[in-house]
Image (cartoon, grey):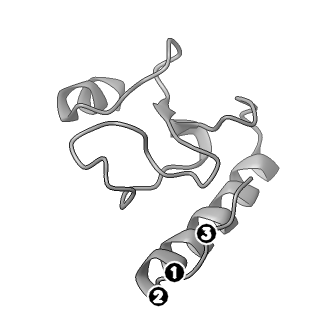
Amino acid sequence: LANQSKNMGFLLTKSQTIVVNASLQVQGGPMDDGSIFACGDVASPPTGNQKQAFQAECQADVAAHNILALLLSRERATL
């Protein structure tokens, strides 16, 4: 995945995770318009880089909420 991400132009951390903001929107990359989200082990949110199942579940909830918010033009949630 890390090599694919590099080839696609996503901004990666030193540990090869995708840089996201507190709304889990990918920062940088080929589509830097806030329409791509990442969570779980592939993401590096600004709240810390803990790789635990419950963290991924919380991130998935936030990402799902924010995808709907983006589609419905509503306010986004943050971690």
Q: Quadrant of the N terminus?
A: top left
Residue beneath the point at 31% across and 33% down: 10
* Residue 42 relative to residue 5: left or right: right
Tell us which disc is closer to us: 2 or 1: 2
* Residue 1 relative to residue 63: left or right: left
- The total number of labels drawn is 3
Q: Secondary structure at mark 1?
A: helix
The picture places residue 32, in percent across and down from the top left corner, at 31, 47
Mark 3, Cα crowd under 10 Å, few <14 / some 14-19 / many 20+, is some
Residue beneath the point at 26% across and 25% down: 6
Q: Please state which of residues 72 and 59 is positioned toward the viewer in this rendering.
A: 72
Residue 59 found in image quarter: bottom right
Disc sitting over residue 76 in the figure: 3
Question: Mark 2: which amino acid?
Answer: Leu
Mark 1, Cα crowd under 10 Å, few <14 / some 14-19 / many 20+, is few
Disc sitting over residue 72 in the figure: 2
State whether residue 41 is above or below residue 64. Answer: above
Q: Please state which of residues 41 and 12 is positioned toward the viewer in this rendering.
A: 12
Residue beneath the point at 49% across and 50% down: 38
The picture places residue 55, in percent across and down from the top left corner, at 77, 48
* Residue 21 relative to residue 37: left or right: right
Disc sitting over residue 68 in the figure: 1
Residue beneath the point at 23% across and 31% down: 9
State whether residue 67 is above or below residue 74. Answer: above
Q: How far is disc 2 from disc 1 in space, using C-alphas? A: 6 Å
Instruction: Answer whether labels 2 and 1 touch (C-beta < 8 Å).
Output: yes
Instruction: Answer whether labels 2 and 3 touch (C-beta < 8 Å).
Output: no
The picture places residue 69, in percent across and down from the top left corner, at 53, 79
Question: Mark 3: which amino acid?
Answer: Arg
